[in-house]
Image (spheres, rainbow, N blue to C red):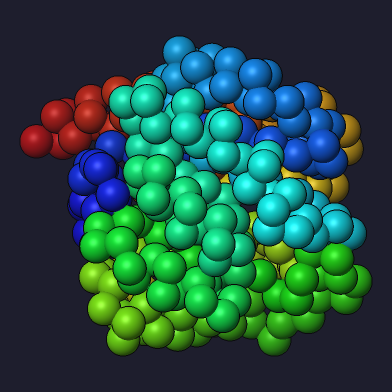
Amino acid sequence: MTVWQTTRFRIDLRRPQVMGVVNVTPDSFSDGGSFAEPKAAMAHCESLLAEGADILDIGGESTRPGARRPEPDEELARVLPVLRHAVTLGVPVSVDTSEPRVMATALDLGVDIINDVRALQRPGAVQAVAAQANAGVVLMHMQGEPGTMQAAPHYDDPVHEVAAFLAARRDALHAAGIAAERIVLDPGIGFGKAVEHNLTLLARQRELLALGSPLLVGWSRKSTLGAVTGRAVGDRLAVSVAAALLAVQRGARIVRVHDVAATVDALKLWRAATQEQGETSA
């Protein structure tokens, strides 16, 4: 599938898309609440677009291990001012939420994509997305809940189990009338997975392409990258860009990142080299 249908945009996936992260939370693992204030988050949206982001992903619930789940009113208070600003910027806007009331409110504002780490499993979530004729959706795999997901994750075969879950959730959305071109799948790197599970998903990522849906992958600043390199979260720029590039080489059509400019530059080089190789082969 080369097009992702969203509320206001049909996103061309022939070119890998860079989704820039805007965490409107006081307890984000990656930026320590730097953009918890609406004005700071709005300015960050504009900065990410200047760096080359194709999509903005705005979230008001921290899903780091052990994070507290906010009440719906609290989550709405965090994200609504930023979403209202973001939808004026001329690019697709995603809201990172599992709360059906936040989904419905965001879609009423014109938000393009619902990005749900719980794959629309909460009561009312599928209905909230189905009620909007064209909204895009990201279904992510997570074993457990953020509070406990890293306690003792276990898989017999992480690739097969992640694929089976994503296929089942996608089929549930199809049954609710949500068209295939609206759906993107995310294997959920770092969500209820040990280091070896995450690395296996990267090594065998091409197997997930058999699902037939576009893949979104988020490796940016994840703890597995720290385990591999020994780097603290603030020092994982190079390895985050490397992981994003590997994900794209192995078939991901969207990468969700914090460091947009560096990722965009790396992908420009990758596309140039790929195009040159294709012309030489021809």
Q: Pick whichever, 66 or 85, lies toward us.
A: 85
Q: Is residue 113 left or right of residue 2?
A: right
Q: Pick whichever, 151 or 240, lies toward us.
A: 151
Q: In this view, does 232 lie to the left or right of 85?
A: right
Q: Pick whichever, 16 or 101, lies toward us.
A: 101
Percent x, y of residue 192: 75, 68
Percent x, y of residue 153: 81, 75
Above or below: residue 106 compared with residue 45: below
Res 31 quadrant in image:
top right
- Residue at the location (61% across, 40% down)? 79
Q: Give the farthest residue toward the left.
A: 282
- Residue at the location (54% across, 15% down)? 47
Which quadrant holds the C terminus? top left
Q: Pick whichever, 182 or 253, lies toward us.
A: 182
Whether residue 92 appears in this view of the structure is: yes
Whether residue 150 appears in this view of the structure is: no
Res 65 quadrant in image:
bottom right
Total numbered labels placed on residues in the image: 0
- Residue at the location (42% across, 39% down)? 93
- Residue at the location (66% across, 26% down)? 38
Percent x, y of residue 185: 44, 64
Percent x, y of residue 206: 43, 63
Which quadrant holds the N terminus? bottom left
Above or below: residue 198 compared with residue 49: below
